[in-house]
Amino acid sequence: MGNKIQKKDTIGPELLGSILDTVSEGFVRCREGAVIWASARAAEIFREDSAEKLIGRELNSLFVPVDPTSALEPSDRHIRFSDGEERILRIAPVGDNGDEELYLVENLTQQRFLENEVQRANRELHHANRERVSLRNRVQCETEERDELLTVISHELRTPITVITGYNRLLLAEKVGTLNEEQQRFCNQSIKSCQRLNNFIANLLEASRESDGEMVLEVTETSVVPTLEGVASFLRPLIEEHGLSLTFDIDPASAAARFDPVRIEQVITNLLSNAIKYSHDGGMIELGTRNIEDGGRSYVEICVADDGPGIAEEDRERIFDPYVRLGDSGHVGGLGLGLALCKRIVSAHSGTIGVDERPGGGSRFFFRLPDASDLPKEPEPTELKPGELESTS
């Protein structure tokens, strides 16, 4: 407590000027509105080579105001230099000493640009959020409508299926007369087709209700030949109705493939049904298999060939898109979903599907399934989205 407090030296103008030259903001000292001193940073802000060029000039003459009514802070100025460049400067008094005033000069152009960008981004984000909410509500509404439609359709389909199955069982029970062997075969095939359709409806409803939105393929290792023969058997009445002949070209060396028999049956049914629709009466359809190598992998290729009008080369890819139907095909019905369904099922099996020209005219649809010997014995299950598979042509 006995120490005496020494009086500090007063900071002079030269020392103050040296200190202000070291900061990032600019400073100018004015007397009666004219600049009598400026820091190097102030000269940079006012686009001068040196602070000396500002001495003696009126502060307000250093810039041309752009919009004095713009929504800026009272100390901010939106200015334009003589060459057209625009800046936003903050010129604020920070002290005075009698007839002299010290002003802080800041270049806020980049800051305000960033602020405007943030505001614009916020507006866009707000708009995007509104769009997202609207889209979510629309999807929810469409999902509810779809589920309701599926319920109605399943009910309307199951009723006639039950009736058809019941009458076929009555016929097979020979309650109204004896059936010959051929008639019994027809009734049995009709019952099997009704059961397939009933299972299809059940799978469709189950898939639409799955919360995770996925469906697992039940893959097995087996030959595709029994599936080909089974489809040909229950479609034979349609084949015979059109006077078509069906031949098989099965490669005896065809190895077993890895596939879901139920799903691949859908593919073969679609392809063979299309071949029946588009073949000329009295024409020929061919089902075949072969082993092929592609990209170092082994595949079993299944083909369905017909002698119909064929498909132009430029349409051979887009025909597998949903709702695409070529030419004047209204007489055969359908929505153009069958081939899109086939493509999705085959892709889910890590296979490929395509179409080319059949020698002699017509179309040759083919798809490839991985050879069972070319894949691990216990692969991860393949998952599909519901709605991709449960469609008909």
Image (spheres, grey):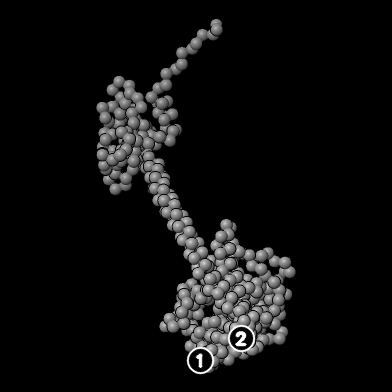
311 relative to 35, above or below: below
Q: Position of residue 389 (x, y in %)?
A: 56, 69
Q: Position of residue 264 (x, y in %)?
A: 62, 75
Q: Is the N terminus in the top left, top right, bottom left or bottom right quadrant?
A: top right
N-term mark: 1 or 2: 2
Residue lying at 55% horizontally and 6% vertically, measured from the top left: 2
User: Which residue matches tag 2?
Assistant: 177
Q: How many marks?
A: 2
Residue count near mark 1 (Cα–Cα under 10 Å), binned few <14, some 14–19, many ≥20? some
Residue count near mark 2 (Cα–Cα under 10 Å), binned few <14, some 14–19, many ≥20? few
Closer to viewer: mark 1 or mark 2? 2
Residue lying at 34% horizontally and 38% vertically, measured from the top left: 89
Q: Is residue 313 left or right of residue 50?
A: right
User: Which residue matches tag 1?
Assistant: 281
Q: Is residue 182 left or right of residue 378?
A: left
Quarter of the figure with residue 77: top left
- Residue farthest to the top, as pictured: 2
- The amino acid type, in three-letter code, at marker 2 is Gly
Residue lying at 41% horizontally and 26% vertically, measured from the top left: 16
Q: Position of residue 153 (x, y in %)?
A: 50, 68
Residue lying at 33% horizontally and 43% vertically, measured from the top left: 87
Quarter of the figure with residue 229: bottom right
- The amino acid type, in three-letter code, at marker 1 is Asp
